[in-house]
Image (tube, rainbow, N blue to C red):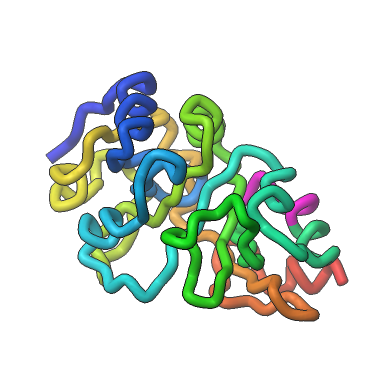
């Protein structure tokens, strides 16, 4: 079943109410909440039917957010952000005091990513805070980069579903996740950006 896209304004309103929305990124469609409006990311686990042990990373709208929501951020993480943001790279850093404990991992870290998607960036700016976002799929099933292939089990549980009308530009490959809390970058999940891409910087 294909979906009608909600308007940008309706999606912003839903997120500002602390509700869940499906949104586009340059990789796959995501499902997210506004971190300043939702008490925790727990509702995302319920929508996805996912265990709560995996923290949910944040989509941010500018490179400076790495230093705003991260603390003690090493130079190599800043270089990665300067090189690959906006883009499919999630950087895991120690969370600053601006991150609510409900959104941190048990180790006190947060994953941050600046998506290379104008619609997503506009959404974050319009809502006024990062969006805790995970792929819009039931846990164990594949994420999708096609609006018409979004799972009814997901879309029936959210307040808004937004398309950017440009599915052909989405890679379908999830972001690469790099742990930046140690002395060297540790790749936790290889995605659209390869280990070779990251090693080429050092």
**As rendered, which of 156 and 18 lies closer to the eye?**
18
Image-based side of 71 in relation to 11, left or right = right
Q: Nearer the viewer, residue 148 or 78?
A: 78
Q: Report if residue 24 is visible in the image.
A: no
Q: Is residue 1 above or below residue 82?
A: above
On screen, residue 190 above or below 122: below
Q: Where does the image place residue 80, in percent across and percent down from the top left?
A: 76, 59
Residue at (74%, 66%) from the top-left corner?
197
Rendered-image quadrant of the C terminus: bottom right
The answer to whether residue 19 shows anywhere in this view is: yes
Q: Is residue 86 magenta?
A: yes
Residue 98 is situated, as x and y percent measured from the top left of the image, at 59, 50
The residues colored magenta run: 81-87
x and y, in percent, of residue 43 in the image? 26, 54
Quadrant of the frame with the N terminus:
top left
Q: Quarter-wise, where is residue 176 in the image?
A: bottom right
- Above or below, 180 relative to 67: below
Q: Residue at x 32, y 41 (%)?
A: 22
Q: Position of residue 199 (x, y in %)?
A: 79, 73
Q: Nearer the viewer, residue 159 or 86?
A: 159
Q: Is residue 194 left or right of residue 1?
A: right
Instruction: Tell which of 114 and 195 is nearer to you.
Output: 114
Q: Residue at x 24, y 46 (%)?
A: 149
Find residue 20 and report its image quarter: top left
Q: Is residue 175 magenta?
A: no
């Amino acid at each position: 079943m294909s979906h009608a896209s909600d308007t940008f304004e309706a999606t912003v309103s839903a997120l500002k109410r602390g509700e869940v929305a499906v949104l586009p990124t340059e990789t796959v469609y995501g499902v997210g909440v506004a971190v300043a409006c939702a008490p925790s990311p727990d509702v995302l686990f319920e929508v996805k039917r996912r265990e709560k042990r995996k923290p949910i990373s944040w989509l941010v709208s500018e490179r400076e957010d790495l230093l705003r929501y991260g603390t003690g951020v090493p130079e190599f993480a800043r270089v990665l952000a300067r090189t690959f943001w906006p883009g499919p790279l999630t950087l895991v850093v120690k969370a600053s005091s601006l991150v609510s404990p409900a959104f941190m991992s048990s180790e006190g870290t947060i994953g941050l990513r600046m998506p290379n998607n104008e619609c997503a960036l506009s959404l974050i700016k319009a809502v006024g805070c990062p969006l805790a976002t995970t792929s819009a799929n039931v846990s164990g099933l594949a994420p999708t980069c096609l609006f018409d292939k979004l799972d009814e089990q997901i879309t029936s549980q959210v307040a808004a579903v937004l398309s950017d009308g440009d599915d052909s530009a989405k890679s379908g490959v999830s972001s690469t996740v790099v742990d930046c809390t140690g002395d060297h970058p540790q790749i936790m999940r290889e995605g659209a950006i390869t280990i070779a891409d990251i090693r080429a910087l050092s």
